[in-house]
Each structure stands twice: as C-alpha cells, then as structure tokens.
Amino acid sequence: MDEILASANLGNGRSIHVAPLSRQTIIDAEAQHLGFGGYFLFEVRSDGAGGGIEVLGKVASLEAAFRLIDIWEGRPLAA
C-alpha cells in the first residue's frame, strides 16, 4: 500500500481506499482471483470485528481509479 490514491473514512473504525496492493496482501485477503497487478478498491477495518483488509474489487484502469476519486469528492465529470 505504498501508493494510496484515495481514502475515505467510513467511521466506526472502517475506511475505504484505492491503491495497488502487494502480492502477499492480495493472497492474505484471498483475492488472488483478481490478479496481482493494477489498482484495487478495498476496505480496512480496525473496529475489532475482523480487522485487516477486504478487497472489494479491482479498478478497471488508472483512469477509472481517478474517476472514482472524483466521485468520492463530488467533482463533476470533466468535459
């Protein structure tokens, strides 16, 4: 998680992020079916109800990752 592109605090010890993940982190999260390259959407829980990382999905491209960030931040679609 050296290159987190975006984060949002969800409250209650939970946050969501877009970033590349290391091979071992992907394996530990049991998400190797998504492959090992690219950018991932994942939740981090530190609320005591499981902890760790849950990979929610893989972002289709770097451009899609930046668009997701724009959506989080409420920016309009660029013309």
Image (cartoon, rainbow, N blue to C red):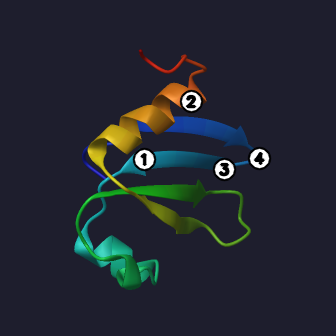
Disc number lying in front (3 or 1) = 1
Residue drawn at x 28%, y 44% is 62
Q: Nearer the viewer, residue 24 or 31?
A: 31
Residue drawn at x 56%, y 47% is 16
* Total numbered labels placed on residues in the image: 4
Give the CA distance from mark 4 to mark 2.
Answer: 22 Å
Residue indicated by mark 3: 14
Q: Position of residue 45 (x, y in %)?
A: 62, 58
Give the CA distance from mark 1 to mark 4.
Answer: 19 Å
Residue indicated by mark 1: 18
Return the disc, 1 or 2, that comes first in the chain's sequence. 1
Pointer 3 with pointer 4, Cβ within 8 A = yes
Give the CA distance from mark 3 to mark 4.
Answer: 6 Å
Residue indicated by mark 2: 71
Give the CA distance from mark 3 to mark 1.
Answer: 14 Å
Q: On the image, which quarter does residue 4 sit in? A: top left
